[in-house]
Amino acid sequence: MNAARGGLTRAQWLRGAGAAAALAGASGLGIIPARAQPPARAQTGAMHTRPIPSSGEALPVIGCGTWLGFDHAPGSADYQRLPGVLAALFAAGGRVIDSSPMYGRAEENTGTLLAAAPGDGTPFIATKVWTRGREAGIAQMQESMRRLRTQRIDLMQIHNLVDWKVHLSTLRDWKARGRIRYLGITHYTPSAHDEVEAVLRAEALDFLQINYALDDRAVEQRLLPLAAERGVAVIVNQPFGGGGLLRRLRDRPLPPWAAEIGCSSWAQVLLKFVLSHPAVTCAIPGTSRPEHMADNAAAGSGMLPDAAFWQRHIAGVLG
């Protein structure tokens, strides 16, 4: 068993998360008080990290999703902003870049942009397999490697559990041979939570990617506590409620309490909420604008509120 940075072993982290989950259940909110959170290592102003439970490797808590945001034609105005997005991510200490073969040009663009990047960041590249059949899955993952210009993917995920039993066998073989470093599953609909839970209980996984937001909290009931219990890292997609919540909040002034937790935008408030749950390893808000990436990344530093804080303020945000 590898020790996590800061001297905590995986077993110690899980014991802490289990105690924290008990506190969350008592609160009725599903958010853990800050003192019970898993370790977040950061100097003042630097991005926090959390350990991947299966290895102890430290992962920065804010990454970048590429759905829509990176699906732009080379040479377009939107495409020309993308190098700045990656630069803002790396400058803030972020590493995780999540893509998929179903995201149009996103994989190809990500690979091209990383190859041209000045080398001031070490990306953690995550993508997905999203097809049926063993050979089709292998072909799709090989194509993803070509597009991303790498011979090894940090995290390969079975997207929406499509043909997961077949692909999981391949991923285990690829992990053993060093073609991928971690394996996981993804989903985004509450109707699939029963199946996600069954897979988490039955299989040894490194990661779960799932949607979670201030107005989309179904995973607090079973999936996030189970991921902590099983030692599975959690990547959160759609931390802004699929964009709808953030759009509704943008024209509202920030409440005075936002400054208490170091937030200067609604995006930062929503990300701090997600990161307040100790089972969450990383959130991956998507964007194609460097200024938004920098703003998102700022939520990964400073204090993370406890359960009592959110109990006082959550109704006012959603009201």
Image: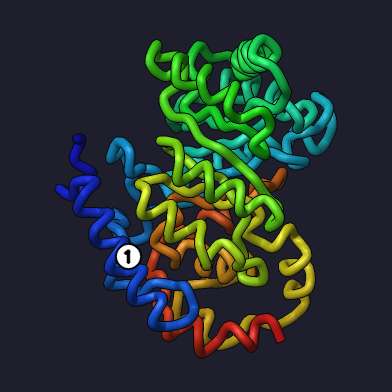
User: Is residue 67 found left or right of 46 in the rendered image?
Assistant: right
User: Is residue 314 found left or right of 172 in the rendered image?
Assistant: right
Tell me if mark 1 has few (under 14), some (14-19) or many (20+) residues whose alpha carbon lies within 10 angstroms of its own.
many
Quadrant containing the C terminus is: bottom right
Residue drawn at x 19%, y 46% is: 9
Local SS, label 1: loop
Please tell me whether residue 174 is drawn above or below residue 250 in the rendered image. above
Mark yes or no: residue 91 visible: no
Indicate the position of residue 246 as horizontal and vertical percent values. Answer: 72, 67
- The one nearer the camera, 60 or 222, is 222
What residue is shown with label 1?
A: 37
**Residue type highlighted by circle 1:** Gln
User: Is residue 145 found left or right of 245 in the rendered image?
Assistant: left
Please tell me whether residue 195 is drawn above or below residue 302 in the rendered image. above
Please tell me whether residue 156 is drawn above or below residue 270 in the rendered image. above
Q: Quadrant of residue 22?
A: bottom left
Residue drawn at x 30%, y 59% is: 38
Residue drawn at x 19%, y 35% is: 1
Please tell me whether residue 305 is drawn above or below residue 202 in the rendered image. below
Indicate the position of residue 301 as horizontal and vertical percent values. Answer: 41, 60
- The one nearer the camera, 178 or 122, is 178
Figure disc tally: 1
Point out the residue furthest to the left here. 7
Residue drawn at x 41%, y 45% is: 232
- The one nearer the camera, 62 or 235, is 235
Mark yes or no: residue 34 visible: yes
Q: How is the image coloured?
A: rainbow
Indicate the position of residue 39 as horizontal and vertical percent values. Answer: 28, 57
Indicate the position of residue 245 as horizontal and vertical percent values. Answer: 73, 69
